[in-house]
Amino acid sequence: MTTRTKTRVTANDVMTKEPICVDAGIGIRQLAQLFEEHEISGVPVVSGNGKLIGVVSQTDLIRRCSEGTPDAPPGYLFELLSDEAGEDVELVPEPLVVVGDFMTADPVTVGPDEPASEVAQRMAEHHIHRIAVVDEESVPIGIITTLDLLKVFPK
């Protein structure tokens, strides 16, 4: 009879290390380009000293673009992001809409040693699809998505 040692899977085991992070001051066009270039759907938002201050997702970006601004109708921000506008179309300059205006502040986080099962439970409780893994100084060291967690379930 053999005994099987059960290894505990932690956040460190499933996270994407060295996540792409953004500053709260970047514009919506830069954010959209970053999502497209890296084929990701969300990123941690950090302060000047690298500490986590929020998270922002494609859903947040779409919601923000749908709202419009005091100077522009709903949907106008989508035109700014569209490659179809072309150079011959003169758009009003991009309104000053930055990530800090619509990010989720004070996001839910986990430490690298937290069991993956507890990470999954916390994500379910908060209805979120990604969670930042931070060190003891609140600097993002990884990110975990729901798909990352699904990969650890036995086949």
Image (cartoon, helix red, strand yellow):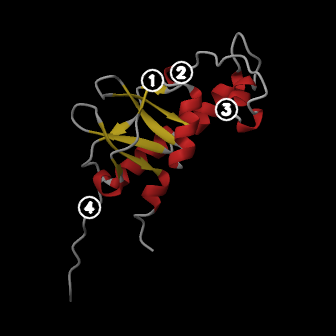
Q: Residue at x 23, y 78 (%)?
A: 4
Give the side of residue 27 with respect to residue 148, left or right: right
Numbered label attached to residue 98: 2
**Image point 49% across, 21% down: which residue?**
100
Of 72 and 85, nearer the camera is: 85
Residue 25, x across and y down, in percent: 46, 21
Give residue 27's position: percent from left, percent from top: 54, 25
Q: Which residue is mark 1?
A: 24
Q: In this view of the protein, which residue sits in the foreground, 131 or 5?
A: 131
Q: Which mark is residue 81?
A: 3
Are there few (<14), some (14-19), or many (20+) residues within 10 Å of tag 2? some
- Nearer to the camera, 155 or 63: 63
Residue under numbered circle 4: 8
Q: Closer to us: mark 3 or mark 1?
A: 3
The picture quadrant where one finds residue 32 is top right
Count residues near mark 3 (Cα–Cα under 10 Å), then give few for <14, some for 14-19, many for 20+.
Answer: some
52 relative position to 137: left or right: right
Which image quarter holds the C terminus? bottom left
- Dot 4: element: loop
Crowd rating for badge 1 (residues with CA inside 10 Å; few <14, some 14–19, many 20+)? many
Residue at position x 58%, y 38% from top? 58
**Cα distance between the residues tagged 4 and 1:** 35 Å
Residue 148 in the image: state x and y as whole percent.
44, 56
Residues at circles 4 and 2 in contact by the CB criterion of under 8 Å: no
Residue at mark 2 to residue at mark 3: CA–CA distance: 13 Å
Badge 4 local density, few (<14 within 10 Å), some, or many (20+)? few
